[in-house]
Amino acid sequence: MKSKKDKKNNLKEEEFTVRSPFQQSLTRFKKNKLAIFGSSVLLILILIVMILPFFIKYDPDVISLSSILKPPSLEHLFGTDDIGRDVFTRIIYGGRVSISIGIFSAFAAITIGSVIGAISGYYGGIIDSILMRFTDLALTIPVMPLLMILGAIFKPNPFFLIIIIGLFNWMSTARLVRGQFLTLRTLDFVTAARALGNNDFRIIFLHIIPNAFAAIIISATLTVGRAIILESVLSFLGVGINPPTASWGNMLQGAQSYIMTAPWLAIIPGMFILFTVLSINFLGDGLTDATDPRRGM
């Protein structure tokens, strides 16, 4: 048995243990119940849409005229649609499309925004002025009408949507990364890197960006949520993913005529969009609090 003195010594050791910034951030993140809930739900959803298609017996595009508008049951967990397709199967395949578009378009936006913000914040002066005025100009573009026009002209596929959503979602990341660089470029480790003969490329991408990575990750999580909503809205309006390919947005579009007679056609994809975006926002807020001690107290 440990004596009281040993216990006191252990408590003192724990009290004065020096933890790294990552460990401190992880501890703050674990205390945020909404962030844990959001990350858990998001992880489960991603695993479901990526793995479950290998085990589903129904084809998402097979029409069954004998099973039109069947309510949820043991045979069809989420019922069937207006041409007899299994809604559960289409939700899973549609989630794969919607979440993939959200993740990859966010990656494109974060890449563009990080590069522009890094160059602007590192060099400053005329380069900063030009890039920030370009960013301001991009912010004035009415994104949704423009995406609708592009979607109507080009009949987009998932790859096209990833590109156009990514091209119009990088501005907030650019501003955030620029702000980080304006602070970090004046610190001693950057001065030391220059003194050791590192060129600007190495200093930006090997020294400063890793120190701004937490802010970039936070921006990425929020951008994924915005991208999923954009894809859903475009598909709902008929200028996004075109049937028969399933996405949560075009499933909502197909449910418009059956709100009263088959409400599950609208409620189920709507709930999946809601829980996915809400989980991403909870995760983003948790990461923000975890990386900012003043907010996580």
Image: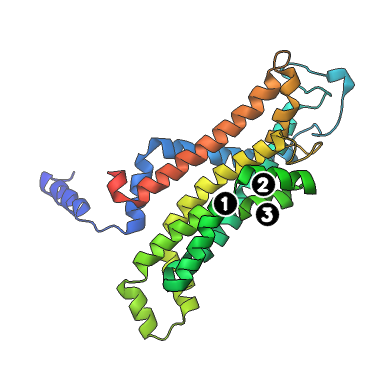
Q: Callout 1: helix, strand or loop? A: loop
Above or below 251: residue 223: below
Q: Name the residue under label 2.
A: 146
Which sits in the foreground, 3 or 79?
79
Report the Cα–Cα distance between label 2 and label 1. 13 Å
- Of the residues under marks 1 and 3, which one precedes in the sequence? 3
What's the amino acid at mark 2? Leu
Tell me the quarter of the image containing the N terminus: top left
Q: Which one is closest to the eye, mark 2 or mark 1?
A: 2
Q: Do the residues labelled 2 and 1 touch (CB within 8 Å)?
A: no
What's the amino acid at mark 1? Asn
Q: Can residue 89 be seen in this view?
A: yes
Q: How crowded is mark 2: few (under 14 residues within 10 Å), some or many (20 or more)?
A: few
Q: Mark 1 points at which residue?
A: 169
- Seen in the image, is 239 located left or right of residue 173? right
What's the amino acid at mark 3? Ile
Q: Position of residue 290 (x, y in %)?
A: 36, 48
Q: Name the residue under label 3.
A: 163
Please, which residue is most extreme toward the left here?
Answer: 5
Q: Where is residue 62 in the image (x, y as percent from the top left)?
A: 85, 31
- Seen in the image, is 227 located left or right of residue 278? right
Report the Cα–Cα distance between label 1 and label 3. 10 Å
